Image (tube, grey):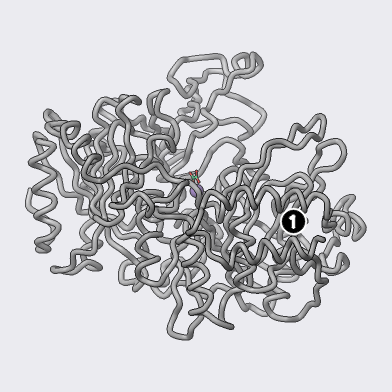
Amino acid sequence: MATLTKNPNVNKWVDEMISLCKPDKVVWIDGSEEQLDGLRAEAISTGEMIKLNEEKLPGCLYHRTLPNDVARVEDRTFICSRKEEDAGPTNNWCDPKEMYAKLTPMYDGVMKGRTMYIIPYSMGPIGSPLAKVGVEVTDSIYVVLNMAIMTRMGAQAFKNLGDESDDFVRGLHSKADVDPEKRYIVQFPEDNTIWSINSAYGGNVLLGKKCFALRIASFQGKNEGWMAEHMLILGIQKPNGEIKYVTAAFPSACGKTNLAMLIPPEGYTKRGYKVWTVGDDIAWLKPGPDGRLYAINPENGFFGVAPGTNEKSNYNALASTKRNTIFTNVAINNDDMTVWWEKLDKNPPVNATEWKGEKVNGPEYVAAGNKLAHPNSRFTAPAENCPCISPEFNNPQGVPISAIIFGGRRAKTAPLVYQSFNWQHGTFVGSIMASETTAAATGAVGVVRRDPMAMLPFCGYHMGDYWAHWLEMGKVLGDKAPKIFNVNWFRTDDNGDFIWPGYGDNMRVLDWIIDRCEGTVDAVETPIGYEPKPEDINVEGLDGITTETVADLLTVDKNLWREEAKGIEEFYKKFGAKLPKEMSDELKALEARLA
Ligand code: OXD
Ligand code: MN
């Protein structure tokens, strides 16, 4: 099949990949519905995908991966920068020459007897100055069909690249034998290249997502004056119709997709508030012509965790999965060919197929302590399905950001919300992000896992240089920089139960954040930052939460924070001479304020 572009750089690289992988057949993905329909039919006929109920879940497909291949594999993920020090202490590193030499024989002839699909795609709206182009070659129809949802895929992507540019990310994927011992997810930042082999699971093989839009893009952003961040983007519409945009970074399993699609409490909706989703996982941010920071969501869909998603926890996410969605590793209800996962509802299907493919009696299986869906089972849903998708979702200029929010899961240390003193202090606040496990029954505090800016598994270069880039961006943005905040929805009481209701009620905290950005509300200075006066958090209509509860959620325990400072000092040691002086200065200043 003929190439879809005149761009010689693309064609040369594709030819090299064909010579290396030696597929029987090569198919360029043009993005047409006709072509995609053919691929769906083929995947259904081979059993790779299963068609779901056309009335209840129109256009939806099911796929199951091997039990050894159900999640991202951080221990097999590499950043192969030319110099080891450029990958930094938090990434696996290998010399790129060595890695190419090791992987090349593994790709040699790997697609004999198979078809190679060549997928052009754009991360970001077509025509956006913030968008970038990638080409992924793969031997998996599942990858093609997922990329069709997650990116702007097909010939249109080449419009952004043009006929001459060399600025595209080269992604090579083969599921090979799905051998976990030979599984590699490798980024070569200086070569704009990603090689992924022996996996067929989303996060490892949809190369536009974590591999490109975070690992490679964070490196590009550092060199080109922009930022690729593991952040949701949402817009808060006020009763006067004005919309303020914020981004937020949380480690995995802290409710990012839920916050991105939040439905405000009744008191707010009645007054005319509304939340719009721009993105749920990744933000690309760049100063705009007016000097403010603008964000696009480089993705075109949601690759969300299914278990826990239900009408109450995230109505909008669930609604997004009702058509043209791919489900991976959830359970099937064989009575009507619909899907089920833990906490969808209280009725596991009787005639079920669990995620590994075994037919079981759902209620009995669950009662015996088994899970019908894999805990990391996923839906791949088009963003356009989301009832609260922002009208600005496809705006090539992006949306102007008023606030950046960091957060984690802390039982006692972090208060409900605080604001950093300034951008530099905000960078420090992001760098000390952490989540901890709590033993609910005893209220005992578990292990603290530091995850700066939620980027630990996703930063494509040295974290010390990454913080330096943040500080640099602060200088570029000056007084137009977004304000930086930290939130913690997860403080627990003496019984280990969460105090704050979370979910839609997090709107009450966003409300204060927006007021702070507009300068319409005062704050109290504490050793860690500015906090709300308890009475400035709206608790109207909340059950059992009073202004006193809020005061309690805002306490800063100096002893805990002194411990915290020691933990940060220990963590910072890892980064050696690359730790920006501003960051150690901030730590010293915090210690002084706590003394
Ligand atoms: C994700 C993650 O899958 O952050 O989005 O792990
Ligand atoms: Mn993520």
Q: Quadrant of residue 190?
A: bottom left
Q: Badge 1, how many Cα within 10 Å: few under 14, some, many 20+?
A: many
Where residue 198 sits: x, y (%)? 29, 31
Is 382 located above or below residue 244 in the figure?
Answer: above
Residue at figure coordinates x 85%, y 55% from the top left: 542
Where residue 168 sits: x, y (%)? 24, 60
Residue hosting label 1: 505
Q: Residue furthest front?
A: 577
Residue at figure coordinates x 75%, y 70% from the top left: 271
Residue at figure coordinates x 81%, y 35% from the top left: 443
| Residue 574 appears anywhere in the view | yes
Where residue 78 sits: x, y (%)? 36, 42
| Residue 314 appears anywhere in the view | no
- Count of labels shown? 1
* Tag 1: amino acid: Asp
Q: Residue furthest bottom?
A: 290
- Check disc 1 and report its element: helix, strand or loop: helix
Where residue 81 sits: x, y (%)? 31, 51
Q: Residue furthest right?
A: 548
User: Ligand 2 near label 1 (Cβ, under 8 Å)?
Assistant: no
Q: Quadrant of the C terminus?
A: bottom right
Q: Is residue 206 rendered to the left or right of residue 399?
A: left
Q: Quadrant of residue 261?
A: bottom right
Q: Quadrant of residue 521?
A: bottom right
Residue at figure coordinates x 37%, y 32% from the top left: 51
Is 122 located above or below residue 59 in the figure?
Answer: below
